[in-house]
Image (cartoon, rainbow, N blue to C red):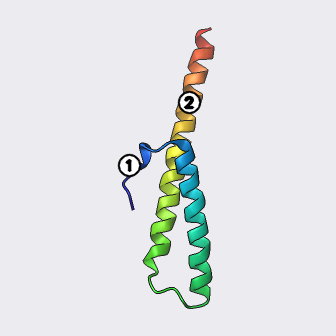
Amino acid sequence: MMKAKEYRQQSDNQLQSLIKENKEKLREFRFALSNKQLKNYNEIKEVKKTIVVAKTILKERFIKEQKSVNLKSAKE
């Protein structure tokens, strides 16, 4: 797993595709877990963590953008 600093260097589209890929992995892991085929349970935890970090960064960017828009409109 990359560090949050490395995720922040990626674009929004890259982060969204990363989330999509990891959600698909998580779904596959859950099926493997239910069929007792999953060997390493820690993979589920890592995938969840990746999704959460990417979503958090996207949310931070959205909030920052909204604040800058509000400040610009307040000045006008």
Vertical order, 56 against 72 (above or below): below
Name which of mark 2 and mark 1 comes first in the sequence. Answer: 1
In the foreground, 40 or 52 = 40
What x and y, as percent, mark residue 8? 43, 44
Considering every residue shown, the one lying at the far top of the view is 76
SS at mark 1 in the image: helix
| Picture disc at residue 36 | none
Nearest to viewer (mark 2 / mark 1): 1
Q: Quadrant of the C terminus?
A: top right
- Identify which amino acid the numbered label 2 is placed on: Glu
The quadrant the N terminus occupies is bottom left
**Residue at the spot x=57%, y=45% of the render?**
13
Look at the picture and state if 50 lies above or below 66. Answer: below
Count of labels shown? 2
Q: Is residue 69 above or below residue 14?
A: above
- Crowd class of label 2 (few under 14; some 14 to 19; many from 20; radius 10 Å): few
Residue under pointer 1: 6
Tell me: 12 left or right of 4: right
What residue is at 47 percent from the left and 54 percent from the top? 53
Q: Position of residue 37 (x, y in %)?
A: 54, 89
Q: Residue 30 at x, y = what percent?
A: 60, 78
* Image coordinates for residue 20, horizontal then vertical, percent: 60, 59
Quadrant for residue 68, please give it: top right
SS label for mark 2 = helix
Q: CA distance from mark 2 to mark 1?
A: 20 Å
Q: Are marks 2 and 1 in contact (CB under 8 Å)?
A: no
- Amino acid under disc 1: Glu
Q: Nearer the viewer, residue 54 or 12?
A: 12
Identify residue for label 2: 65
